Amino acid sequence: MQTTTFLDIPPEFGLQMIKAQAMERSLPFDEPPDGVTLHLPLGQIHACGENGGLRLTLNASDDVKLHLLQEVVDHRLDEAAVALDRRWSLTNPGLVPPNLTFATVASCEHVYPSYYRVRLSGASLERFSRDGLHFRLLFPPESHIGQWPFVLGSGRVEWPGGISQWHRPVYTTRSVDPENGTLDFDVFAHEGGRVTDWCKTLQPGMDVAIMGPGGEWLPDAAWIALFGDETALPAIARILESLPTETSGVATILVSDAHDKQHLKTPSGMAVRWLVRGDGISLLNELKQLEIPDDNRFVWIASERSEVNQARDMLADRGLQKSEMRAASYWSRQQS
Protein backbone atom coordinates (compact mmCIF):
# COMPACT_ATOMS: atom_id res chain seq x y z
CA MET A 1 0.00 0.00 0.00
CA GLN A 2 1.11 3.55 -0.67
CA THR A 3 0.40 7.15 0.27
CA THR A 4 2.15 10.38 -0.70
CA THR A 5 2.32 14.02 0.31
CA PHE A 6 3.96 17.14 -1.14
CA LEU A 7 6.00 19.43 1.10
CA ASP A 8 6.48 23.00 -0.07
CA ILE A 9 10.07 23.21 1.12
CA PRO A 10 13.39 23.40 -0.77
CA PRO A 11 14.17 19.82 -1.84
CA GLU A 12 17.85 20.06 -0.89
CA PHE A 13 16.90 21.10 2.65
CA GLY A 14 14.36 18.28 2.92
CA LEU A 15 16.73 15.57 1.68
CA GLN A 16 19.49 16.70 4.02
CA MET A 17 17.06 16.75 6.94
CA ILE A 18 15.93 13.19 6.22
CA LYS A 19 19.49 11.89 5.87
CA ALA A 20 20.48 13.58 9.13
CA GLN A 21 17.55 11.97 10.96
CA ALA A 22 18.45 8.56 9.52
CA MET A 23 22.09 8.81 10.56
CA GLU A 24 21.22 10.10 14.03
CA ARG A 25 18.96 7.07 14.62
CA SER A 26 21.15 4.54 12.78
CA LEU A 27 18.39 3.86 10.24
CA PRO A 28 19.38 2.15 6.97
CA PHE A 29 18.97 4.28 3.85
CA ASP A 30 20.18 4.47 0.29
CA GLU A 31 20.42 7.28 -2.24
CA PRO A 32 18.92 6.42 -5.63
CA PRO A 33 19.42 9.00 -8.41
CA ASP A 34 16.16 10.80 -7.63
CA GLY A 35 16.45 11.17 -3.85
CA VAL A 36 16.67 9.24 -0.56
CA THR A 37 14.95 6.02 0.57
CA LEU A 38 14.72 5.03 4.25
CA HIS A 39 14.11 1.39 5.20
CA LEU A 40 12.16 0.97 8.44
CA PRO A 41 10.52 -2.10 10.02
CA LEU A 42 7.13 -0.63 9.12
CA GLY A 43 7.98 0.05 5.48
CA GLN A 44 9.85 2.47 3.24
CA ILE A 45 9.98 6.26 3.01
CA HIS A 46 11.11 7.70 -0.33
CA ALA A 47 11.85 11.41 -0.74
CA CYS A 48 12.57 13.19 -3.99
CA GLY A 49 12.49 16.68 -5.45
CA GLU A 50 9.36 17.72 -7.37
CA ASN A 51 8.28 21.10 -8.76
CA GLY A 52 10.59 23.00 -6.42
CA GLY A 53 9.41 21.06 -3.34
CA LEU A 54 9.74 17.62 -1.78
CA ARG A 55 7.57 14.59 -2.51
CA LEU A 56 7.32 11.96 0.22
CA THR A 57 6.05 8.49 -0.73
CA LEU A 58 5.39 5.87 1.93
CA ASN A 59 5.08 2.14 1.17
CA ALA A 60 3.99 -0.62 3.57
CA SER A 61 2.57 -4.12 3.37
CA ASP A 62 -0.83 -3.31 4.93
CA ASP A 63 -3.01 -0.40 6.00
CA VAL A 64 -2.06 -0.60 9.70
CA LYS A 65 1.68 -0.40 9.00
CA LEU A 66 1.12 2.36 6.46
CA HIS A 67 -0.87 4.39 8.96
CA LEU A 68 1.79 3.91 11.66
CA LEU A 69 4.52 4.89 9.21
CA GLN A 70 2.57 8.03 8.30
CA GLU A 71 2.19 8.88 12.00
CA VAL A 72 5.96 8.56 12.47
CA VAL A 73 6.55 10.96 9.58
CA ASP A 74 3.84 13.36 10.75
CA HIS A 75 5.33 13.43 14.26
CA ARG A 76 8.82 14.28 12.98
CA LEU A 77 7.51 16.95 10.59
CA ASP A 78 5.33 18.49 13.31
CA GLU A 79 8.33 18.64 15.66
CA ALA A 80 10.25 20.50 12.98
CA ALA A 81 7.23 22.71 12.13
CA VAL A 82 7.49 21.66 8.47
CA ALA A 83 4.49 21.89 6.11
CA LEU A 84 1.88 21.75 8.87
CA ASP A 85 -0.93 21.98 6.26
CA ARG A 86 0.19 18.84 4.38
CA ARG A 87 -2.36 16.39 2.96
CA TRP A 88 -1.90 12.69 2.27
CA SER A 89 -3.19 10.98 -0.87
CA LEU A 90 -4.69 7.92 0.87
CA THR A 91 -7.55 8.92 3.16
CA ASN A 92 -10.66 7.39 4.66
CA PRO A 93 -12.50 10.46 5.98
CA GLY A 94 -14.79 9.82 8.94
CA LEU A 95 -13.52 6.30 9.66
CA VAL A 96 -11.52 5.33 12.73
CA PRO A 97 -7.78 4.86 12.14
CA PRO A 98 -6.90 1.35 10.87
CA ASN A 99 -4.81 0.62 13.98
CA LEU A 100 -7.78 1.18 16.32
CA THR A 101 -9.61 -1.98 17.38
CA PHE A 102 -12.74 -2.45 19.47
CA ALA A 103 -12.97 -5.47 21.74
CA THR A 104 -14.89 -6.66 24.78
CA VAL A 105 -13.72 -7.85 28.19
CA ALA A 106 -13.78 -11.63 28.52
CA SER A 107 -12.31 -11.74 32.04
CA CYS A 108 -10.15 -9.92 34.57
CA GLU A 109 -8.34 -11.86 37.29
CA HIS A 110 -6.02 -10.84 40.13
CA VAL A 111 -3.45 -13.50 39.19
CA TYR A 112 -0.50 -12.33 41.37
CA PRO A 113 -0.30 -9.92 44.31
CA SER A 114 0.84 -7.09 42.03
CA TYR A 115 -0.82 -8.02 38.73
CA TYR A 116 -4.21 -8.22 37.09
CA ARG A 117 -4.59 -10.25 33.92
CA VAL A 118 -7.17 -8.91 31.48
CA ARG A 119 -8.48 -11.02 28.63
CA LEU A 120 -10.09 -9.27 25.66
CA SER A 121 -12.23 -10.87 22.99
CA GLY A 122 -12.68 -9.62 19.44
CA ALA A 123 -12.53 -10.37 15.74
CA SER A 124 -9.47 -8.22 14.91
CA LEU A 125 -6.88 -9.18 17.52
CA GLU A 126 -4.63 -11.53 15.52
CA ARG A 127 -2.34 -8.73 14.35
CA PHE A 128 -1.31 -8.04 17.96
CA SER A 129 0.67 -11.30 17.89
CA ARG A 130 3.24 -9.71 15.56
CA ASP A 131 4.86 -6.45 14.45
CA GLY A 132 5.05 -4.90 17.93
CA LEU A 133 5.03 -5.90 21.60
CA HIS A 134 2.82 -3.07 22.81
CA PHE A 135 -0.53 -1.35 22.38
CA ARG A 136 -2.41 1.55 23.94
CA LEU A 137 -5.62 1.47 25.93
CA LEU A 138 -7.84 4.41 24.98
CA PHE A 139 -9.76 6.39 27.59
CA PRO A 140 -11.55 9.47 26.16
CA PRO A 141 -11.95 12.69 28.16
CA GLU A 142 -15.13 12.92 30.23
CA SER A 143 -16.59 15.45 27.80
CA HIS A 144 -16.23 13.04 24.86
CA ILE A 145 -17.25 9.64 26.23
CA GLY A 146 -18.41 7.43 23.36
CA GLN A 147 -16.45 9.39 20.74
CA TRP A 148 -13.37 8.00 19.04
CA PRO A 149 -10.51 9.28 16.87
CA PHE A 150 -11.37 9.58 13.19
CA VAL A 151 -9.54 10.27 9.93
CA LEU A 152 -9.81 13.72 8.38
CA GLY A 153 -9.85 14.53 4.67
CA SER A 154 -6.14 15.37 4.96
CA GLY A 155 -5.40 11.80 6.00
CA ARG A 156 -4.47 12.87 9.52
CA VAL A 157 -6.30 11.80 12.68
CA GLU A 158 -8.59 14.02 14.76
CA TRP A 159 -8.90 13.25 18.49
CA PRO A 160 -12.17 14.61 19.97
CA GLY A 161 -11.25 17.08 22.70
CA GLY A 162 -7.57 17.03 21.65
CA ILE A 163 -5.11 14.17 21.97
CA SER A 164 -3.57 15.63 25.13
CA GLN A 165 -6.88 15.12 26.93
CA TRP A 166 -6.94 11.37 26.25
CA HIS A 167 -5.45 8.82 28.63
CA ARG A 168 -3.51 6.39 26.42
CA PRO A 169 -1.35 4.12 28.63
CA VAL A 170 0.91 1.58 26.94
CA TYR A 171 0.68 -2.14 27.76
CA THR A 172 2.36 -5.29 26.51
CA THR A 173 0.45 -8.02 24.72
CA ARG A 174 1.05 -11.08 26.91
CA SER A 175 -0.45 -13.59 24.50
CA VAL A 176 -2.88 -13.86 21.59
CA ASP A 177 -5.09 -16.85 20.73
CA PRO A 178 -6.13 -16.28 17.09
CA GLU A 179 -8.42 -19.33 16.99
CA ASN A 180 -10.51 -18.12 19.93
CA GLY A 181 -10.06 -14.41 19.16
CA THR A 182 -8.60 -13.42 22.54
CA LEU A 183 -5.75 -11.22 23.75
CA ASP A 184 -4.26 -11.25 27.27
CA PHE A 185 -2.33 -8.46 28.95
CA ASP A 186 -1.09 -7.91 32.49
CA VAL A 187 -1.53 -4.72 34.53
CA PHE A 188 0.95 -3.90 37.29
CA ALA A 189 -1.31 -2.74 40.12
CA HIS A 190 -0.42 0.33 42.13
CA GLU A 191 -2.69 2.24 44.51
CA GLY A 192 -4.47 5.15 42.87
CA GLY A 193 -3.48 4.13 39.35
CA ARG A 194 -6.22 4.86 36.83
CA VAL A 195 -5.92 1.51 35.06
CA THR A 196 -5.66 -0.33 38.40
CA ASP A 197 -8.97 1.23 39.43
CA TRP A 198 -10.40 0.38 36.00
CA CYS A 199 -9.44 -3.28 36.44
CA LYS A 200 -11.44 -3.42 39.68
CA THR A 201 -14.61 -2.44 37.76
CA LEU A 202 -14.27 -4.75 34.76
CA GLN A 203 -17.07 -7.15 33.92
CA PRO A 204 -17.41 -9.56 30.98
CA GLY A 205 -18.90 -7.84 27.97
CA MET A 206 -17.63 -4.34 28.73
CA ASP A 207 -16.33 -2.49 25.65
CA VAL A 208 -12.65 -1.61 25.28
CA ALA A 209 -10.77 0.31 22.58
CA ILE A 210 -7.10 -0.41 21.91
CA MET A 211 -4.63 1.01 19.40
CA GLY A 212 -1.66 -0.86 17.98
CA PRO A 213 0.39 -2.90 17.77
CA GLY A 214 3.44 -0.72 18.11
CA GLY A 215 6.78 -0.26 19.76
CA GLU A 216 9.71 -2.61 19.66
CA TRP A 217 9.79 -6.21 18.50
CA LEU A 218 11.83 -9.21 19.64
CA PRO A 219 15.60 -8.82 20.12
CA ASP A 220 17.56 -10.69 17.45
CA ALA A 221 20.87 -12.16 18.66
CA ALA A 222 22.34 -15.51 19.70
CA TRP A 223 22.94 -14.20 23.25
CA ILE A 224 20.42 -11.93 24.98
CA ALA A 225 20.31 -10.33 28.42
CA LEU A 226 17.01 -8.91 29.70
CA PHE A 227 16.73 -6.64 32.75
CA GLY A 228 13.52 -5.15 34.09
CA ASP A 229 11.50 -4.17 37.12
CA GLU A 230 7.83 -4.85 37.92
CA THR A 231 6.58 -2.72 35.04
CA ALA A 232 8.76 -4.61 32.54
CA LEU A 233 7.87 -8.13 33.67
CA PRO A 234 5.04 -8.55 31.10
CA ALA A 235 7.36 -7.53 28.25
CA ILE A 236 10.18 -9.79 29.46
CA ALA A 237 7.75 -12.70 29.74
CA ARG A 238 6.49 -12.10 26.19
CA ILE A 239 10.03 -11.87 24.81
CA LEU A 240 11.25 -14.99 26.62
CA GLU A 241 8.33 -17.08 25.42
CA SER A 242 8.85 -15.93 21.82
CA LEU A 243 12.63 -16.36 21.46
CA PRO A 244 14.12 -19.09 19.23
CA THR A 245 14.88 -22.27 21.17
CA GLU A 246 18.64 -21.95 20.54
CA THR A 247 18.90 -18.51 22.21
CA SER A 248 21.13 -18.27 25.28
CA GLY A 249 21.53 -15.58 27.94
CA VAL A 250 19.91 -14.40 31.15
CA ALA A 251 16.82 -12.53 32.32
CA THR A 252 17.00 -10.57 35.58
CA ILE A 253 13.65 -9.42 36.99
CA LEU A 254 13.09 -7.19 40.02
CA VAL A 255 9.71 -7.52 41.77
CA SER A 256 8.12 -6.00 44.87
CA ASP A 257 6.68 -9.22 46.27
CA ALA A 258 8.26 -12.67 46.23
CA HIS A 259 4.84 -14.07 45.32
CA ASP A 260 4.98 -12.15 42.03
CA LYS A 261 7.55 -14.64 40.73
CA GLN A 262 6.08 -16.53 37.78
CA HIS A 263 6.88 -19.68 35.89
CA LEU A 264 8.09 -18.43 32.52
CA LYS A 265 8.57 -20.49 29.40
CA THR A 266 12.14 -19.92 28.17
CA PRO A 267 14.70 -21.40 25.78
CA SER A 268 16.81 -23.99 27.60
CA GLY A 269 19.89 -21.77 27.36
CA MET A 270 18.22 -18.78 29.06
CA ALA A 271 18.53 -18.44 32.83
CA VAL A 272 15.97 -16.46 34.86
CA ARG A 273 17.04 -14.64 38.02
CA TRP A 274 14.42 -13.13 40.33
CA LEU A 275 15.25 -10.23 42.66
CA VAL A 276 12.98 -8.88 45.40
CA ARG A 277 13.19 -5.19 46.29
CA GLY A 278 15.06 -4.32 49.48
CA ASP A 279 18.51 -4.49 51.05
CA GLY A 280 20.08 -2.29 48.38
CA ILE A 281 19.30 -4.66 45.51
CA SER A 282 19.22 -2.90 42.14
CA LEU A 283 19.20 -3.79 38.46
CA LEU A 284 22.20 -1.52 37.86
CA ASN A 285 24.35 -3.50 40.28
CA GLU A 286 23.40 -6.70 38.48
CA LEU A 287 24.11 -5.09 35.11
CA LYS A 288 27.59 -4.02 36.27
CA GLN A 289 28.45 -7.65 36.99
CA LEU A 290 27.08 -8.99 33.71
CA GLU A 291 29.55 -10.88 31.54
CA ILE A 292 28.84 -9.87 27.94
CA PRO A 293 30.16 -11.80 24.93
CA ASP A 294 32.11 -9.97 22.23
CA ASP A 295 29.59 -10.37 19.41
CA ASN A 296 26.10 -11.59 18.40
CA ARG A 297 24.76 -10.04 21.60
CA PHE A 298 21.88 -7.86 22.72
CA VAL A 299 21.15 -6.26 26.10
CA TRP A 300 17.60 -5.10 26.87
CA ILE A 301 16.62 -3.12 29.95
CA ALA A 302 13.38 -1.40 30.95
CA SER A 303 12.63 0.29 34.27
CA GLU A 304 12.59 3.76 35.85
CA ARG A 305 13.88 6.61 33.65
CA SER A 306 16.97 7.68 35.64
CA GLU A 307 18.03 4.06 36.04
CA VAL A 308 17.61 3.43 32.32
CA ASN A 309 19.70 6.49 31.46
CA GLN A 310 22.53 5.21 33.65
CA ALA A 311 22.25 1.75 32.12
CA ARG A 312 22.46 3.17 28.59
CA ASP A 313 25.67 5.03 29.44
CA MET A 314 27.08 1.98 31.19
CA LEU A 315 26.47 -0.26 28.19
CA ALA A 316 27.95 2.29 25.78
CA ASP A 317 31.05 2.52 27.97
CA ARG A 318 31.38 -1.26 27.69
CA GLY A 319 31.48 -1.01 23.92
CA LEU A 320 27.92 -1.91 22.92
CA GLN A 321 26.60 -0.18 19.81
CA LYS A 322 23.08 1.26 19.59
CA SER A 323 22.06 -1.76 17.52
CA GLU A 324 23.16 -4.07 20.35
CA MET A 325 21.04 -2.59 23.11
CA ARG A 326 17.60 -1.33 24.02
CA ALA A 327 17.14 0.87 27.11
CA ALA A 328 13.51 1.90 27.61
CA SER A 329 11.98 4.12 30.28
CA TYR A 330 8.67 2.62 31.46
CA TRP A 331 8.06 5.14 34.24
CA SER A 332 9.55 8.18 35.96
CA ARG A 333 10.08 8.51 39.71
CA GLN A 334 9.12 12.19 39.51
CA GLN A 335 5.71 11.19 38.16
CA SER A 336 5.06 8.23 40.46
Image (spheres, rainbow, N blue to C red):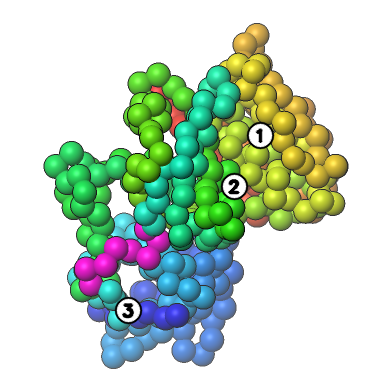
Please check the rendered image and state whether residue 151 is part of the magenta-colored stretch, yes or no.
Answer: no
Residue position marked by numbered label 2 in the rendering: 175
Q: Nearer the viewer, residue 20 or 211?
A: 211
Q: Nearer the viewer, residue 331 or 142?
A: 142
Mark 1: amino acid: Phe
| Cα distance in 3D space between marks 3 and 1 | 41 Å
Residue position marked by numbered label 1 in the rendering: 227
- Residue 29: give x, y in percent of width and height: 56, 73
Q: Which callout, 3 or 1, points to the residue nearer the camera?
A: 3
SS type, badge 3:
loop
- Residue 66: give x, y in percent of width and height: 43, 71
Q: Residue at x 71, y 43 (%)?
A: 240
Mark seen at residue 90? 3
Determine the main secondary structure of the stretch shown in magenta: loop
Specify whether 6 is left or right of 38: left
Specify whether 194 is left or right of 84: right
Q: Which image quadrant: the N terminus?
A: bottom left
Q: Which residues are magenta?
A: 93-100
